[in-house]
Amino acid sequence: MIPAEKAREFIKKHDKIAIPKEDFDRFSEPYRILGLYVSNQLSEYYDYTTNFRRYQEQFGTDPKTNPWNTEEGLELANFLFGSGIGPYISRIWDFMDSLPYQDRYSKRPFRVDPSRAYSKNKLARLNSIYYGGHSSFNTMAPMDQMQYDVYQNVQDIGLYYTLLLMDDPEKYYPLLEEIFLGEHEIGGVSSELIKALLLTE
């Protein structure tokens, strides 16, 4: 591994993604609302209940609905997450359907409507990944992201790593093997890398 300060210097060399509220005006109303929701700018004082209701007014209450699975959804995903992660967002959304419901350390209350809980949880996870762009992490190459993950905590980006591992295991597994054996010059074991390996079949 390398000093954390040196790692941060490398990460900061990449493009930052921090989108002003007015830049979402280029999208249709449903996708403008979605973009503002994911970037946490839908209201001045964040109200989870009201904001999620506005999302449901645009995309409905079915948790299986994938708002990213359209041409405009892909455009918004690339805008929010960069050209590397963006094309994976639709798949990440669908992949989350296969996971047990979990909101950090809490489970879904028995009486909570699944259509509300599951979609809300998906959006929260995308919000976490979006914030990786603020530190320039989301515009790094995938190999670099895995190497530097231990230095920059981007919650839920392990979902993205999971799909990378599924798509091209021969490319990424040797890197992870070096990291987990402590033989890699830069990378170290992180919770998101562990998550990705656990979720990979």
Image (cartoon, rainbow, N blue to C red):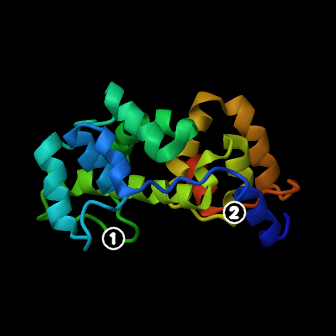
Q: Nearer the viewer, residue 53 or 13?
A: 13
- Separation of residues labelled 1 and 2 (CA atoms): 24 Å
**Number of disc labels:** 2
In the image, residue 77 above or below residue 35: above
Above or below, comparing residue 4 to residue 177 in the picture: below
**Residue to which mark 2 is pinned:** 150
Residue at horizontal 40%, vertical 32%? 74
The amino acid at mark 1 is: Ser
Return the residue at label 1. Answer: 106
- Image side of residue 110 versus residue 128, left or right: left
**Which amino acid type is shown beneath numbered disc 2?**
Val
Q: Secondary structure at mark 1?
A: loop
Label 1 Cα crowd, 10 Å radius (few <14 / some 14-19 / many 20+): few
Viewer-closest of 63 and 132: 132
Which residue is pictured at 37% across the width and 45% down the height?
96
Q: Is residue 97 above or below residue 91?
A: below
User: Where does the image place residue 101, in percent across and percent down from the top left?
Assistant: 32, 56
Front-most of residues 189 and 53:
53
Viewer-nearest of discs 1 and 2? 2
Residue appearing at x 65%, y 29% in the figure: 168
Q: Toward the viewer: 137 or 25? A: 25
**Mark 2 Cα-neighbour bin, 10 Å: few <14, some 14–19, many ≥20:** many
Image quadrant where one finds the N terminus: bottom right
Q: Does any portion of residue 61 appear in the rendered image?
A: no
How far across and how far down the image is residue 196, in percent?
A: 57, 48
Tell me which numbered mark, 1 or 2, is placed earlier along the sequence: 1
